[in-house]
């Protein structure tokens, strides 16, 4: 996978190449050498509709111009490895890699080309349930969320949440501090090196418990408020089931819920009394309803 990751990093360093164009190329070529073995006309065909596609293909086939980008990408990859940060790219059929298959359902412009990960990357392909909330919550709703985290851990499923505020902290502390130190997945809305200081001890404890901290942003990116929507969609994409506690319109959580429902994912939750969600949301009424969630996550 290192050749794929290096190629992805090099692509993203090129002027005018974003995640959509890079994703289209990586879908067909696992490395720079694989691209160079393909006829130029075929590469151009795969970039149909991309602005200045001909110029990009000329650059890609000019090894002298591409070599500095590839070398710089290799240096970045080695620097990350020294910090024990794994850099993951979508797996091709012939390559085994812990890449969440559900991310392929995300809109192209929001679909990550790379994931930066610290901890047990194998969690990315285990059944996970994503929990979403934005304080304040009613006390009874908050207690139900905590009960669900305990239920997921007892059922062998992986709870997943952001790493931004008190609700997220409780999710990960309950997992890491419970019997057997259960792992959780933490999805950051910034680069891993820019995690807010109050959240770093929580992330460290979760990783020590076998968890995983991950982000679609480069380590030194952010934090910026507008990136939280991408974080929420990434979290929804990597989980097999999602649960929303009192979601409100015009929030990243509402955007993630809307996408998950439109994508046909199993979506559960407790509505905000003042902001009814779509009727297709599976409403939680009692703790016995938790079994719906565990069943959906194992499918």
Image (spheres, grey):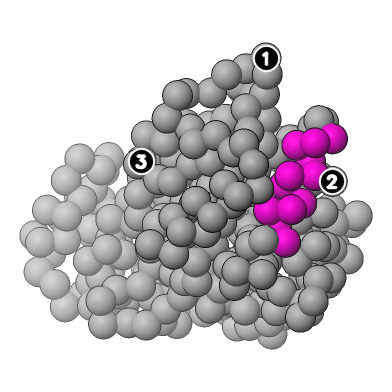
The range drawn in magenta is 139-150
Residue 234 visible in the snapshot: no
Name the magenta segment's main secondary structure: helix
In this rendering, is residue 281 above or below 287?
Answer: above
Residue marked by disc 2: 166
Q: How many residues crowd mark 1 within 10 Å: few (<14), some (14–19), many (20+)?
A: few
Image-quadrant location for residue 121: bottom right
Question: Does 249 sit above or below residue 8?
Answer: above
Viewer-side residue, 142 vs 225: 142
Identify the residue position indicated by label 3 in the image: 263
Image quadrant in which the N terminus is located:
bottom left
The residue under label 1 is: 274
Query: Who comes first in sequence, dot 3 or dot 1?
Result: 3
Measure the alpha-carbon separation of dots 2 and 3: 29 Å
Confirm whether the magenta stretch covers residue 214.
no
Quadrant of image for the C terminus: bottom left
Q: Where is residue 182 in the image (x, y as percent from the top left)?
A: 71, 74
Instruction: Describe the element under mark 2 as helix, strand or loop.
Output: helix
Residue 176 lies left or right of residue 39; in this view the side is right
Q: Does the magenta stretch include residue 141?
A: yes
Element carrying mark 1: loop
Residue at horizontal 65 percent and vertical 48 percent from the top? 287
Say if 224 sits above or below 118 in the image: above
Q: How far apart are marks 2 and 1 (CA)?
A: 22 Å
- Mark 2 or 1, nearer chain start: 2
Asked whether disc 3 touches disc 1, contact meaning CB atoms under 8 Å apart, the reply is: no
- Residue 67 location in percent, x, y? 40, 75
């Amino acid at each position: 996978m290192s050749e794929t990751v290096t190629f992805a990093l090099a692509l993203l360093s090129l002027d005018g190449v974003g995640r959509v164009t890079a994703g289209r190329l990586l879908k067909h070529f696992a490395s720079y050498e694989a691209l160079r073995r393909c006829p130029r006309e075929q590469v151009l065909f795969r970039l149909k509709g991309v602005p200045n596609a001909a110029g990009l293909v000329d650059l890609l086939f000019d090894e002298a111009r591409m070599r500095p980008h590839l070398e710089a990408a290799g240096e970045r990859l080695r620097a990350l490895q020294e910090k024990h940060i794994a850099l993951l790219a979508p797996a091709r059929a012939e390559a085994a890699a812990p890449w969440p298959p559900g991310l392929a359902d995300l809109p192209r412009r929001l679909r990550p080309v790379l994931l930066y990960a610290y901890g047990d990357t194998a969690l990315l392909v285990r059944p996970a349930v994503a929990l979403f909330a934005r304080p304040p919550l009613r006390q009874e709703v908050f207690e139900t969320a905590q009960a669900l985290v305990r239920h997921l851990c007892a059922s062998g499923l992986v709870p997943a949440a952001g790493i931004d505020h008190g609700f997220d902290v409780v999710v990960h502390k309950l997992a890491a501090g419970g019997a057997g130190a259960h792992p959780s997945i933490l999805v950051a809305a910034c680069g891993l090196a820019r995690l807010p200081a109050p959240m770093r001890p929580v992330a460290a404890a979760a990783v020590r418990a076998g968890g995983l901290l991950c982000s679609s942003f480069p380590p030194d990116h952010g934090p910026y408020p507008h990136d939280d929507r991408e974080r929420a969609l990434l979290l929804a994409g990597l989980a097999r089931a999602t649960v929303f506690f009192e979601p409100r319109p015009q929030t990243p959580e509402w955007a993630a819920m809307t996408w998950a429902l439109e994508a046909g994912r199993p979506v559960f939750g407790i509505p905000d009394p003042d902001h009814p969600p779509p009727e297709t949301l599976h409403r939680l009424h009692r703790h016995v309803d938790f079994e719906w969630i565990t069943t959906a996550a194992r499918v």
